[in-house]
Image (spheres, rainbow, N blue to C red):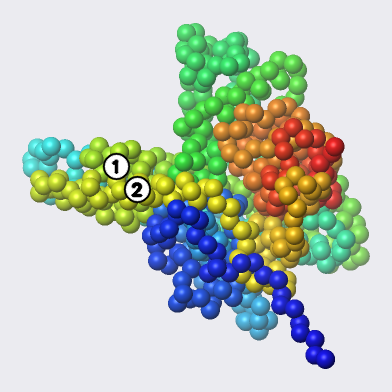
């Protein structure tokens, strides 16, 4: 009797996932190329897609697709067209029920991979050999791009043009400048994302090469041990927190700590400081510090509503108050950098000594030095792009939104973000055409009902729980960036497919052992940035994913657990630098653990246990 082989388990097909009730027509919010489609069904239904909960955990507002559409091109082109990464092309994107799903395009044919190796060695090798010189140029390019964006003026449309248009023979008017300013802002975003990936994939590739050497030379070495060999490096994402610590020390030196009494808002603190000369001195220092260090998004920076410290100073002022109190108690508030570096150097020496030949030791040292050289960019680019640049970009877009709202296109300026960027261009053109000829624009009647419908859809999509993945499961996941950054491994995919009991039933969760050590404490489940103020000293932070601006929180907690992320995600890197146990990529921590439960975080084994 012939045995019929059971079909391989798979996630739901994107073509079989139902639209949530009340969300019919959600596809109209996005470009035609961004949704799964019948004409590409054979291709799209044959791939594994996973929800990008790391960068885009929420439904995508139509305008906010500019960030993911930008990295779609930026990441892909540097892998496939510029540096010719041997085993990897780009990462494809689709939107389903408002959520972003992505799929890595790996190259599995050894012959094709082999043909790409020489191109990669030559092109990537040039960047590695000239890294410091090229990186200095990159910092200059990135800063200039940010300043270009800051310098774009969004004009109003006056009742009549200034007479200088005539007397100076300018030849162009406010109508031209409105459209040109919008075009320049959009082009500037594209440009910044081109720069974003100029170095990033090479940074990961250098680390992965070193990681692969270590795994071959030391088969039992843990991923976190390899990661610790490149730790103890100063990166820009720690600088805003370091500035808060410096400002806390300055408050003590100037004798103005009384202004930071518990319960006061930032505005109340600043009002009291303004009453004294030492207080004014502190405020002047703060004002200089804000640009750029307060351009620090509360989220990943990918959504327009992810505001920054510069927009809302509640978190930095709360951290300032905490640092002042700790300094008054005589505590050391500095990161344990020296301890981390000593542990790093000990590990490097021990593993180097295990190698049998001088040739192997040299290869180990060369790859380690390259990984440590390139590593700062892996974190630093985030500050330049997603935080500093994006904060300015979103606020610049609010200027256009205000122009449209003042002219009756929207009831609220924030409504503009329910339009795709190309629809905003149409609305602006409608406005300037109306202004030019003196007749009513169509937009004030056309857009409000569309916005109202999209608001209702987005609200309902927030209540929908996207599946972790779509489509067939590959036998093995090998694409390196998918593993290191998102934490998507063969084991993790199998875990997603495993039957699960009701939330709270499981007493143990497994993820990546991201930062060593064991800690027990009370869990604090944080699902959004507005809950960060609830985190208490000594708690275990449990969250979907951390944002870089949460760094001050790591000075308060005993350990961290996340749903999403791999060994090189932000939560993992920060935990290692603070010497905190961390387990990332658990998948279900925020759905399983409840605030107030006592938990154990084992950063050595990657196990989180709910203790009863």
Question: x and y percent of residue 402 in the render?
Answer: 30, 38
**Closest to the observer, 395 or 294:** 395
Q: Position of residue 165 (x, y in %)?
A: 12, 42
Q: Quadrant of residue 337?
A: top right
Q: Which residue is mark 2?
A: 451
**Mark identifier at residue 588:** none
Q: Quick one: 79 or 15, which is closer to the camera?
A: 15
Image position of 128 with respect to 238: above or below? below
Q: Quadrant of the C terminus?
A: top right
Question: Circle 2 — which element?
Answer: helix
Farthest top residue?
A: 276
Left or right of 120? Residue 22 is: left
| Residue at screen point 76% across, 84% down | 4
Pinpoint residue 371: horizontal percent, then vertical percent.
70, 56
Q: Is residue 348 left or right of residue 305?
A: right
* Dot 1 alpha-carbon crowd within 10 angstroms: few under 14, some 14 to 19, many 20 or more: many
Q: Residue at x 63, y 58 (%)?
A: 468
Quadrant occupied by the N terminus: bottom right
Q: Are marks 1 and 2 in contact (CB under 8 Å)?
A: yes
> Is residue 43 rendered to the left or right of residue 434?
right
On residue 410, the disc is 1
Residue 512 left/right relative to 242? right
Q: Position of residue 221 (x, y in %)?
A: 85, 58
Instruction: State how far apart marks 1 and 2 are (Cα).
Output: 8 Å
Q: Earlier in the sequence, mark 1 or mark 2?
A: 1
User: Residue 563, can we see it?
Assistant: yes
Q: Which residue is at a point 65% across and 19% down the rendered structure image?
A: 324
- For label 2, the crowd category at 10 Å Cα-Cα, with few meaning under 14, some 14 to 19 and many 20 or more, is some
- The number of numbered badges drawn on the structure is 2
């Amino acid at each position: 009797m012939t045995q019929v082989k059971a079909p391989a388990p798979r996630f739901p097909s994107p073509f079989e996932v139902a639209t949530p009730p009340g969300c019919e027509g959600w596809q109209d919010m996005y470009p035609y190329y961004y949704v799964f489609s019948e004409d590409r069904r054979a291709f799209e239904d044959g791939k594994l897609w996973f929800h990008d909960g790391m960068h885009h955990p929420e439904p995508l507002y139509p305008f906010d697709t500019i960030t993911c559409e930008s990295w779609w091109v930026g990441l892909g082109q540097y892998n496939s067209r510029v540096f010719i990464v041997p085993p990897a092309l780009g990462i494809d994107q689709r939107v389903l029920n408002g959520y972003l799903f992505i799929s890595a395009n790996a190259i599995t044919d050894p012959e094709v991979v082999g043909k790409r190796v020489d191109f990669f060695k030559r092109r990537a090798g040039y960047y590695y050999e000239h890294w410091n010189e090229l990186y200095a140029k990159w910092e200059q390019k990135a800063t200039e791009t940010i300043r270009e964006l800051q310098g774009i003026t969004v004009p109003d449309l006056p009742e009549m043009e200034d007479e200088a248009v005539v007397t100076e023979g300018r030849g162009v008017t406010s109508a031209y400048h409105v459209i040109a300013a919008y075009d320049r802002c959009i082009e500037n975003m594209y440009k910044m994302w081109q720069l974003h990936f100029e170095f990033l994939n090479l940074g990961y590739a250098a680390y992965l090469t070193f990681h692969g050497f270590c795994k071959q030379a030391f088969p039992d070495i843990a991923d976190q041990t390899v990661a610790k060999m490149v730790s103890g490096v100063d990166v820009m994402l720690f600088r805003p927190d370091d500035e808060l610590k410096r400002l806390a020390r300055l408050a003590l030196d100037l004798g103005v700590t009384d202004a930071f009494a518990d319960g006061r808002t930032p505005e109340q603190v600043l009002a009291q400081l303004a009453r004294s000369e030492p207080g004014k001195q502190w405020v002047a220092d703060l004002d200089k510090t804000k640009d750029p260090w307060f351009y620090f998004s509360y989220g990943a920076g990918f959504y327009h509503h992810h505001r920054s410290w510069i927009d809302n100073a509640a978190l930095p002022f709360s951290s300032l108050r905490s640092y002042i109190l700790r300094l008054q108690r005589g505590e050391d508030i500095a990161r344990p950098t020296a301890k981390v570096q000593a542990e790093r150097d000990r590990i490097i020496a021990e593993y180097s000594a295990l190698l049998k030949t001088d040739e192997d030791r040299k290869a180990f040292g060369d790859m380690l030095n390259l990984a440590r050289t390139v590593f700062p960019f892996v974190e630093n680019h985030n500050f330049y792009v997603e935080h500093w640049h994006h904060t300015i970009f979103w606020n610049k877009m609010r200027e256009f939104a205000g122009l449209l709202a003042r002219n009756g296109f929207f009831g609220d300026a924030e409504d503009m973000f329910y339009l795709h960027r190309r629809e905003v261009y149409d609305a602006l053109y409608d406005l300037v055409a109306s202004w030019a000829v003196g007749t009513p624009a169509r937009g004030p009647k056309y857009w409000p009902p569309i916005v109202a419908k999209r608001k209702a859809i987005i609200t309902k999509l927030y209540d929908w729980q996207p599946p972790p993945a779509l489509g067939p499961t590959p036998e093995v996941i090998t694409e390196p960036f998918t593993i290191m950054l998102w934490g998507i491994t063969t084991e993790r995919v199998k875990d997603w497919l495993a039957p699960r009991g009701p939330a709270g039933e499981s007493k143990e969760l497994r993820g990546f052992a991201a930062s060593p050590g064991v800690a027990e404490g009370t869990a604090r489940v944080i699902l959004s940035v507005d809950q960060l103020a609830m985190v208490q000293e000594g708690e275990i932070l449990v969250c979907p994913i951390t944002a870089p601006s949460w760094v001050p929180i790591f000075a308060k907690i005993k350990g961290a657990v996340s749903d999403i992320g791999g060994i090189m995600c932000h939560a993992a890197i920060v935990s290692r630098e603070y010497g905190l146990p961390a387990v990332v990529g658990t998948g279900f921590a925020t759905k399983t653990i409840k605030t107030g439960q006592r938990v154990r975080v084992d950063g050595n084994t990657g196990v989180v246990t709910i203790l009863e």
